[in-house]
Amino acid sequence: MRIEPVDLKDKARFRELAEAYWRELMPKSVVLQDAEWREAYFREEFAWDGGDRHPYWALVDGRPVGFVSFEVSEGQKHAFIDNFCVVPEERRKGYGRDLVAWLFSHLDSLGVERIDLNVRRDNPTALAFWQAQGFGIAGYRLRQYRDPESGTAFEGALSSDF
């Protein structure tokens, strides 16, 4: 497996991979229902300007088997994994573990001392995976999406409802 930054010339190919990940992760989200929202979300999640959130993908025989994007705080002591995906047909082959090992090595070289990420409550497989990589539950973050005009919560108010 080879891990490398996604080149700008491969942005469209990468986007297909990212959107497949979103369809699995949040199939009812407005991001998938509306092209403008999808475009804005893609721009928000991934960057090609040399800063944080630049995606790296894992390639086996030239085909992508997964990807990761992350942010490193100023001072290089803290990182947040924004996106991590191993494509469904490539899971349970060690690619996720190898991608995490690469990420740990890369972040160690930057002096990162703490790494955070979010796992959805309805994804026990992901939770078990991250715990096997040495992560522990640090807290729970609750969220509600609201319509301020009506004062009511949206359908699918929790991220796990998407």
Image (tube, rainbow, N blue to C red):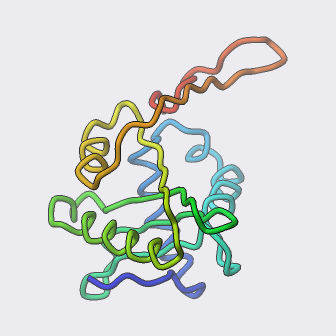
- Where does residue 115 sit, x and y in percent of width and height? 48, 56
Q: Nearer the viewer, residue 69 or 158?
A: 69
Query: Residue 144 falls in which quadrant of the image?
Result: top right
Query: Residue 84 falls in which quadrant of the image?
Result: bottom left
Judge left or right: residue 130 versus residue 93: right
Q: Is residue 33 above or below residue 108?
A: above
Q: Residue at x 57, y 59 (%)?
A: 78
- Where does residue 35 sit, x and y in percent of width and height? 66, 53
Q: Residue at x 32, y 85 (%)?
A: 2
As drawn, the residue found furthest toward the top would be 151
Q: Is residue 152 above or below residue 70?
A: above
Q: Nearer the viewer, residue 158 or 36?
A: 158
- Where does residue 79 sit, x and y in percent of width and height? 54, 60
Query: Residue 126 falls in which quadrant of the image?
Result: top left
Q: Residue at x 45, y 66 (%)?
A: 68
- Is the N terminus in the top left, top right, bottom left or bottom right quadrant? bottom left
- Where does residue 123 sit, x and y in percent of width and height? 32, 37
Q: Residue at x 47, y 67 (%)?
A: 16
Judge left or right: residue 162 versus residue 121: right
Q: Is residue 76 above or below residue 11?
A: above
